[in-house]
Image (cartoon, helix red, strand yellow):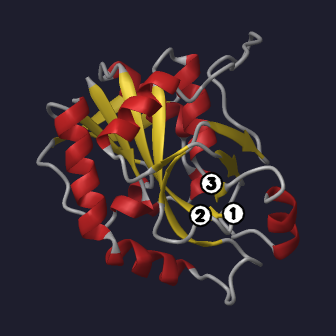
């Protein structure tokens, strides 16, 4: 069964009719929308990225029986060749903050948390998206400083606050994981102005129909 994770980019899109369920896990509970697919909205009760219980969310998806995950993530561009409005399917990631783990008492190694096969299938479903690029995760909830972006842009193409944690936990749970990033803005220092959260929400509203169409295409082709 296909699991989908949605965030800011899906806030204003029309979602499929699914049954709301609370799933209890060893790490806490999470709310899922269940039917022919399982949908997790990561910012439940308006939680900012640094307060999300990623372990509970990902464990709940596993308990619900999903066997692959496509995550939607809002991101900023670190690469002037990737302009706002673009869609990117990243093929690697790095993190500037702690990433949660379900392996509290063992050593595990993540070799390829972003599934090449699932990423290719996602690209075939959404061919207008760019396949390739590195996503870097920061802690949030604040946006990054110009100095941080100048450093990060030497090593990555996109910046966000969630996907590295989700991809790592999916790998630990043995669940193939791919992501599609909506590029909402140039990161701080690459743009003329200073981005606010309200502007980010306005961008999500602007692209809500496109994002909803992509969601439906993914469900039709991959569920």
Q: Counting residues from the N terminus, which is met first, the one under dot 3 or under dot 2?
A: 2
Instruction: Give me the disc on residue 82.
Output: 2
- Residue 3 shows in this picture: yes
Which mark is drawn over residue 115?
Answer: none
Of callouts 3 and 1, which one flags the residue occurring earlier in the amino acid sequence?
A: 1
Residue that appears at 15% across and 33% down: 35
Q: Position of residue 173 (x, y in %)?
A: 51, 17
Q: Residue 153 location, x and y as percent? A: 79, 60
Residue furthest to the bottom in view is: 193
Q: Quadrant of the C terminus?
A: top left
Q: Quadrant of residue 151?
A: bottom right
Q: Label 3 vs label 2: CA separation? A: 18 Å
Q: Which mark is residue 161?
A: 3
Q: Write down the residue under mark 1.
A: 79
Secondary structure under tag 1 reads: loop
Q: Nearer the viewer's eye, disc 3 or disc 1? A: 1
Q: CA distance from mark 3 to mark 1?
A: 17 Å
């Amino acid at each position: 069964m296909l699991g989908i994770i949605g965030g800011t980019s899906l806030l204003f899109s029309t979602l499929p009719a699914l049954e709301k369920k609370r799933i209890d896990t060893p790490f806490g509970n999470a709310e899922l929308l269940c039917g022919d697919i399982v949908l997790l909205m990561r910012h439940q009760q308006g939680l900012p990225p640094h307060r999300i219980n990623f372990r509970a969310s990902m464990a709940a998806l596993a308990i619900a029986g999903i066997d692959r995950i496509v995550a939607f993530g809002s991101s900023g561009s670190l690469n002037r060749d990737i302009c706002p409005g673009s869609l990117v399917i990243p093929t690697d990631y790095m993190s500037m903050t702690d990433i949660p783990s379900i392996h509290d008492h063992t050593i595990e190694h993540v070799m390829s948390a972003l599934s090449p096969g699932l990423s290719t299938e996602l690209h075939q479903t959404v061919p207008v998206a760019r396949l390739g690029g590195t996503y870097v995760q920061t802690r949030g909830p604040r946006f990054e400083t110009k100095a941080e972006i100048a450093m990060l842009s030497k090593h990555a193409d996109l910046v966000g606050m969630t996907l590295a944690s989700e991809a790592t936990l999916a790998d630990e749970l043995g669940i193939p994981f791919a992501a599609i990033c909506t590029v909402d803005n140039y990161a701080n220092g690459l743009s003329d102005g200073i981005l606010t959260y309200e502007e980010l929400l306005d961008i999500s509203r602007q692209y809500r129909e496109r994002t909803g169409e992509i969601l439906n295409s993914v469900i039709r082709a991959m569920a």
